[in-house]
Image: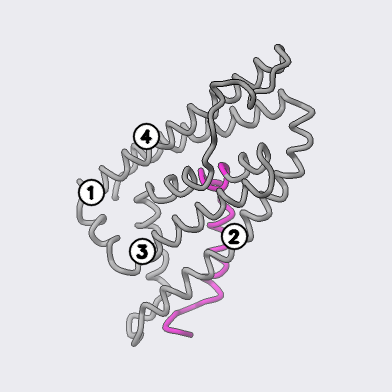
Amino acid sequence: MFGTLNLPEYALGALLIVLLPGPNSLYVLSVAARKGVRVGYRAAFGVFLGDTTLITVTALGAASLLAHSPAAFDVIKYLGAGYLTYLGVGMLRSAIRALRSRHTGVPAEARPEAGVERPFHKALIVSLLNPKAILFFLAFFTQFVDPHAAHPAEAFALLGAIVQIFSLSYLSALILGGDRLASVFRRRKRLAASMTGGVGSLFLGFAAKLATASLG
């Protein structure tokens, strides 16, 4: 179909991969729980745009450049790890502010150092600064593209559309679940701070994993 092979197997594999926890989905969940549905979808569309860009780049052959250029891979790898570290530290600081405000009675968002969150931009940058994602798309997609297809771009487009449908559905579930959790978090500040701090710690772990990643 449209130059693809074993499409049902691909769909199952893509679904399982989307369900694996990662920095994008955790960030969307955290934003939705703290800020609500509308802001959660801003982060989700940042993820969607970033992943769509990576899928397009993969189809155009840029993944081959990264696979054969350790220098280019390292540059993007360290930029991505650095940004994940920045987000993780920011979340840990936010958790500390929330715990302090619980004792002072001043809402964390009302404190001057709380800052303004830009979920769309943050999610977009996290998605784009992930060279392993480009290599993953290349390795995974090519298994299901017919090498004799007259128009392989159509096959890549179909495979990309399937994984993006799964991704948006999953992120929507996280956003709606996060919004329901928000009312609980507003009443239980310690729980909210613990979740934010936990996600921040996971982001630091993702940063360390990305920084030590290799092409092999």
Which marked residue is nearer to the observer: mark 3 or mark 1?
A: 1
Residue type at the position of mark 2: Leu
Alpha carbons under labels 3 and 1: distance apart: 16 Å
Count of marks, rendered view: 4
State which mark lies toward you, 2 or 3. 2
Mark 4 closeness class: few <14, some 14–19, many ≥20 residues within 10 Å: some
Residue type at tag 3: Leu
Query: In x, y percent, where is residue 215?
Result: 29, 50
For residue 67, above or below residue 60: above
Q: Nearer the viewer, residue 46 or 165?
A: 46
Going from N to C along the chain, the mark reached first, 3 or 1, is 1
> Label 3 near label 4: C-beta < 8 Å?
no
Span shown in magenta: 1-27
Q: Which residue is under mark 1?
A: 72
Q: Residue at x 64, y 24 (%)?
A: 110
Q: Amino acid at mark 1?
A: Ala
Where is residue 3? Give x, y as percent: 42, 83
Which numbered disc, 4 or 1, marks the residue that appears first in the sequence? 1
Q: Indicate whether 207 appears above or below 140.
A: above
Using residue 180 as the reference point, say whether residue 87 is left or right of it: left
What separation in Å lies between label 4 and label 3 (alpha carbons)?
24 Å
- Work out how far the residue at label 4 is from the one at label 1, CA to CA, in angstroms: 16 Å
Three-letter amino acid code at the position of disc 4: Gly
Q: Quadrant of residue 15?
A: bottom right
Rendered image: mark on residue 82: 4
The mark nearer the N terminus, 4 or 3, is 4
Residue 77 position within the rendered picture, expressed as x and y whole percent measured from the top left: 32, 43
